[in-house]
Image (spheres, rainbow, N blue to C red):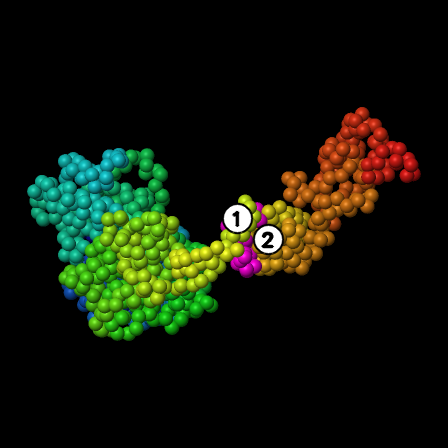
């Protein structure tokens, strides 16, 4: 019927035509337009239009629940079962057959698929849905697909679909045309309820009850996470009998998710309590009211943890606009916002792409498997930051996945088989085949899935609950673990397994604080003082999250001291520190396990190597001022900058460049002088000797440290003065000068500070000839009254220069 026509249908023919003549396309359509289901069906020839893709179509979804529901809707629309013409592949569920023409797949699994089969054999098109979420797996998957299309499969079709997207930027990056569907949107009234200091569940309950009183229709309420949803659901237990409450988040059982998105029974209203999964990925029937908390859970890098952690933040403007639009998809609606109208203007325009803020170790491992060591050779919407790429390589080298040259090792190749973060993949790959690997596989399956096995911090308790969990999700993960463990029965020696795999994660309770543990890797983690594990002396930290200095330990295993000392990397070393105030090196001889100090004793006479390293460390952190060398370093930098400005040199280094390669030029000097500091002259010489020969010559010739005057007197050139280059001398030495003194072959005039016989500054000039003809007369008048015995000629331009002699001595010399 015409009334049932979805907005995306107006552009399906355009999409088909574009892909018939090209192999890339960007499609923008608002939530509810029908793009997720109708575009793949249309391209496959299963909806109205003839097929324009030869081969299977992969539809990538960023979330499992969205993938499952999209697959189910399409399967239902073509009158078949899931797994027939329309299939589904997620980490814990796979329903695909030889008949499958459209396979809905999560973005993480697509990365594994293309790495295993770079040609994507049998695949005719890859559709990246909900690309505006800018998840790391989607960005990486697109980069690999574009590379495969360019090098191996010029017939492969790539489509990027999004609800809200900077289409011009994306289209330019991948060189693709854009098609837009403007959708169908009914008017939505926005009502601001204001932010209060109450807990979010209290504010949300108040907003929902107001919406129930003031409006009709079902309500979609946006909350940041599952815990918030549960707390709000508890507060809504006593709603009217014609109102049903339905939670919706990723960890729910499939039946519960289906109940949330299905239409409310006749005569009933529904309150759907959802995370941001309902912003665009899902269509919920019957909703005409939205209550928005204005908050979202985003993934942020979790150093020392298993991937990223979820943090509650203010939602972006793009997100709250999408949420508001859900109220007007089928009829006029209302959006209640739990904040003030003025606060909307302060929201970030859009969420930051994960590739700019996430741990990139998994991506770098995937690129190494792809055979690409330089991420810059691939096409990205936003290029991965170089610093994060370097940190990821360092982590992978430490795990043994990459060699020092960045190539994939045998262990790294084995790790790549598992759809896990690198730390968990290393746990499984390092374990011996048999009971140890079976145990490692169960731990990895548990730790890689949020909330599995309960919320206990103790890994043993979580593992026990996981093994007896009868839910479909747990059973699927256990089947997957059994596959990784190759069917063996798991061993019980969990302490040895983890200590061998993760010696850098061994931690000891910090003296004086019963709830804080120092990890060998250098981070500190805190437990609640009431947690039973807080009484442990030693543990292996499996997962933790929070700030960089002190995190919250969320999963750990208590171990014995013997286990820690047997498997931890214990070493004896000398440690020195340099006191910048006393300019003195102090040292200790320590026995340590990474950052954990086991014992220590004073070391009166550290080796030159240890002392020099301590001095260099303080320069790296505090700068050259710490060793009294700031002036000579800055002086050298200013000399080079002066020469660059005079076009004598190009691309000159600066102080930051030299601070970045202290090993090359400063360390050899420190090894000679340690434990004492080198002189300023020695630092200058070492720095200049490190420069390329043309720079050394230019400094000597065109920016010297001293300048020879006509009298034969030599004066120092000041390159640190704001008036640099500057020289100072008595006025008489400049008498008779026909040209103003300069450097760099006359290109850089010297600033001259003329001094009185008492060595006080009386005039400054960068043009002697103009000074003799002008300002000199006033200066000479003052000087003749103060220093009548000295020489102050009427015509200094033609007088003989001398070193400031009195008239008597000057006449005697003549």
Residue 195 is a magenta residue: no
Label 1 belongs to which residue?
579
Q: Is residue 531 left or right of residue 350?
A: left
Percent across and percent down for residue 224 are: 25, 46
- Structural crowding at the residue carrying mark 2, measured as other residues with C-alpha within 10 Å and reported as few (<14), some (14–19) or many (≥20): some
Q: Residue at x 21, y 48 (%)?
A: 227
Residue 609 is a magenta residue: yes
Quadrant, the C terminus: top right
Whether residue 381 appears in this view of the structure is: no
Q: Residue at x 64, y 56 (%)?
A: 686
Towards the viewer: 611 or 482: 611
Q: Residue at x 71, y 48 (%)?
A: 705
Label 2 belongs to which residue?
676
Image: magenta residue range? 605-627
Percent across and percent down for residue 666 are: 59, 56
Towards the viewer: 713 or 356: 713
Towards the viewer: 763 or 292: 763
The CA distance from mark 2 to mark 1 is 12 Å
Whether residue 694 appears in this view of the structure is: yes
Q: Secondary structure at mark 2?
A: loop
Q: Which image quarter: residue 79?
A: bottom left
Of the image marks 2 and 1, the number of the one nearer the N terminus:
1
Q: Is residue 775 left or right of residue 435?
A: right
Q: Residue at x 31, y 45 (%)?
A: 313
Magenta region, main secondary structure: helix
In this rendering, the answer to whether 62 lies above or below 246 is below
Q: Is residue 707 left or right of residue 556?
A: right
In this rendering, the answer to whether 216 lies above or below 510 is above
């Amino acid at each position: 019927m015409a009334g049932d026509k979805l907005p995306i249908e107006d552009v399906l023919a355009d999409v088909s035509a574009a892909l018939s003549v090209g192999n890339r396309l960007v499609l923008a359509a608002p939530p509810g337009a029908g793009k997720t289901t109708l575009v793949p069906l249309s391209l496959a020839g299963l909806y109205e239009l003839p097929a324009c893709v030869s081969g299977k179509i992969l539809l990538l979804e960023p979330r499992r629940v969205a993938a499952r529901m999209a697959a189910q809707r399409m399967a239902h629309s073509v009158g078949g079962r899931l797994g027939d013409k329309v299939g589904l592949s997620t980490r814990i569920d796979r329903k695909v057959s030889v008949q499958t023409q459209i396979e809905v797949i999560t973005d993480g699994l697509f990365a594994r698929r293309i790495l295993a089969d770079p040609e994507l054999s049998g695949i005719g098109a890859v559709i990246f849905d909900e690309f505006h979420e800018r998840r790391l797996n989607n960005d990486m998957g697109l980069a690999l697909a574009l590379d495969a299309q360019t090098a191996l499969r010029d017939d492969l079709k790539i489509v990027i679909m999004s609800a809200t997207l900077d289409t011009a930027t994306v289209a330019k990056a991948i060189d693709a045309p854009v098609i837009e569907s403007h959708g169908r949107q009914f008017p939505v009234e926005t009502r601001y309820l204001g932010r209060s200091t109450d807990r979010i569940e209290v504010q949300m309950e108040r907003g929902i009850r107001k919406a129930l009183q003031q409006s009709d229709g079902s309500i979609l309420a946006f909350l940041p996470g599952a815990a918030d949803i549960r707390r709000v659901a508890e507060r809504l237990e006593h709603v009217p009998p014609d109102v049903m409450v339905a939670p919706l988040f990723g960890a729910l059982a499939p039946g519960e998710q289906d109940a949330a998105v299905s239409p409310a029974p006749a005569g009933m209203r529904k309150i759907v309590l959802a995370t941001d999964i309902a912003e665009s990925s899902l269509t919920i029937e019957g909703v005409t009211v939205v209550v928005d908390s204005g908050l979202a859970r985003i993934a942020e890098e979790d150093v020392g943890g298993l991937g990223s952690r979820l943090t509650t933040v203010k939602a972006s403007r793009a997100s709250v606009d999408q949420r508001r639009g859900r109220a007007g998809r089928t009829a006029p609606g209302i959006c209640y916002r739990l904040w003030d109208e003025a606060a909307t203007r302060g929201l970030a325009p859009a969420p930051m792409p994960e590739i700019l803020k996430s741990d990139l170790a998994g991506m770098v491992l995937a690129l190494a498997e792809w055979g690409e060591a330089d991420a810059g050779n691939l096409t990205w919407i936003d290029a991965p930051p170089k610093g994060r790429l370097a940190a990821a390589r360092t982590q992978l080298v430490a795990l043994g996945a990459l060699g020092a040259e960045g190539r994939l090792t045998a262990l790294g190749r084995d790790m790549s088989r598992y759809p896990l973060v690198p730390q968990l993949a290393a746990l499984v790959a390092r374990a011996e085949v048999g009971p140890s690997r079976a145990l490692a596989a169960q731990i990895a399956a548990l730790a890689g899935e949020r909330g599995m096995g309960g919320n206990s911090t103790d890994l043993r308790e979580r593992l026990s609950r996981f093994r007896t969990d009868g839910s479909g999700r747990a059973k699927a993960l256990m089947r997957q673990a059994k596959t990784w463990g190759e069917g063996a029965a798991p061993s019980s020696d969990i302490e040895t397994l983890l200590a061998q795999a993760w010696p850098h994660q061994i931690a000891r309770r910090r003296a004086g604080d019963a709830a804080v543990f120092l990890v060998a890797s250098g981070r500190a983690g805190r437990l609640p003082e009431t947690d039973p594990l807080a009484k442990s002396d030693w543990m292996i930290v499996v997962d933790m999250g929070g700030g960089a200095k002190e995190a919250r330990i969320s999963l750990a295993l208590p171990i014995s001291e013997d286990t820690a000392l047997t498997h931890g990397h214990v070493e004896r070393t000398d440690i020195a520190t340099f006191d910048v105030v006393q300019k003195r090196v102090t040292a200790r001889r320590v026995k340590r396990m990474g950052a954990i100090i086991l014992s220590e004793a004073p070391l009166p006479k550290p080796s030159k190597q240890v002392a020099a390293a301590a001095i260099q460390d303080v320069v790296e952190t505090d700068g050259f001022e710490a060793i009294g060398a700031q002036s000579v370093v800055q002086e050298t930098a200013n000399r080079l900058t002066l020469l660059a400005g005079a076009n004598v040199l190009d691309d000159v280094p600066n102080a930051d460049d030299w601070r970045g390669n202290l090993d090359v030029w400063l360390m050899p000097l420190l090894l000679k002088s340690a434990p004492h500091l080198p002189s300023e002259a020695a630092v200058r010489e070492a720095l200049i000797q490190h420069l390329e020969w043309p720079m050394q010559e230019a400094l000597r010739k065109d920016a010297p440290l001293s300048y020879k005057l006509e009298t034969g007197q030599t004066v120092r050139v000041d390159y640190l003065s704001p008036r640099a280059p500057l020289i100072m001398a008595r006025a008489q030495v400049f008498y008779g000068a026909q040209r103003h003194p300069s450097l760099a072959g006359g290109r850089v005039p010297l600033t001259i500070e003329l001094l009185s016989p008492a060595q006080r500054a009386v005039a400054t000039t960068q043009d002697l000839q103009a000074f003799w003809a002008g300002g000199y007369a006033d200066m000479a008048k003052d000087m003749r009254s103060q220093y009548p015995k000295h020489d102050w000629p009427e015509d200094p331009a033609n007088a003989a220069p001398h070193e400031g002699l009195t008239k008597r001595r000057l006449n005697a010399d003549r």
